[in-house]
Image: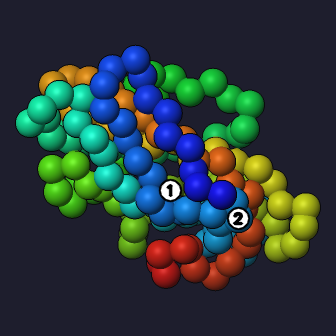
Amino acid sequence: MRPSAASSALAGQMIIEEPSGATVKVKSTGTTGSICATGDGTPPTSGATLAGVWAVIQGPDAEVPEEAPEGATPGELTGDTTWEFVGGNIIPGAKCAAAAPLPNNVLVVWGKWSTGAWLFATAPFAGVQAPKTECGD
């Protein structure tokens, strides 16, 4: 299942490339842990670049705010429109289990653009306990 992308009413979008499946490896030895994420964005206006990117993991029924909330994990920009949460900067708060039934989570990634516009994308996933994330962290 490909993650769904959602954005505010502005043109452009954030795109979550990884994780890309319905079941995601959660680095954990318990019932909560961390995941990695990578992606790209389509600028809301020509020439705009990402100024920052943040992420949280929330429950499937939680409302998604238009801007990243306080306490969201900041990611690393890898280009004008590309970003990642890898290595020592993976996203905490994913619920997981070693076997079915696996708990449902939603990854939310916000990008703030050089124009001041905020866009976000969501990716629902079920968390499976693993020694490493999808990115090998």
Q: Residue at x 91, y 61 (%)?
A: 101
Q: 120 and 42: which one is in front?
A: 42
Which of pointers 2 and 1 indicates the residue nearer the eye?
A: 2
- The reply to whether callout 2 and callout 1 are in contact (CB within 8 Å) is no
Dot label at residue 5? none
Question: In the rendered image, which quarter is residue 62 located in?
Answer: top right
Q: Position of residue 83 (x, y in %)?
A: 30, 55
The answer, for residue 22, to whether it is visible in the render is: yes
Amino acid type assigned to the residue bearing label 2 in the image: Thr
The residue at the far right in this view is 101
Residue placed under numbered mark 1 in the picture: 91
Placement of 61 over or under 26, stated as above or below: above
Indicate left or right for 21 with 89 as reference. right
Q: Left of 129 or right of it: where is 37?
A: left
**Camera-side residue: 135 or 81?**
81
Q: Earlier in the sequence, mark 2 or mark 1?
A: 2
Q: Secondary structure at mark 2?
A: strand
Residue at image location 59% in from the left, 55% down from the top: 2
Q: Which residue is mark 2?
A: 23
Q: Is residue 64 left or right of residue 55?
A: right
Residue 52, given in percent of the width and then of the height, sits at: 25, 41
**Does residue 84 sit above or below 131 in this rendering?**
above
Identify the residue at image location x=41%, y=48%.
15
Provide residue 115's location: percent of width, then percent of height: 15, 25
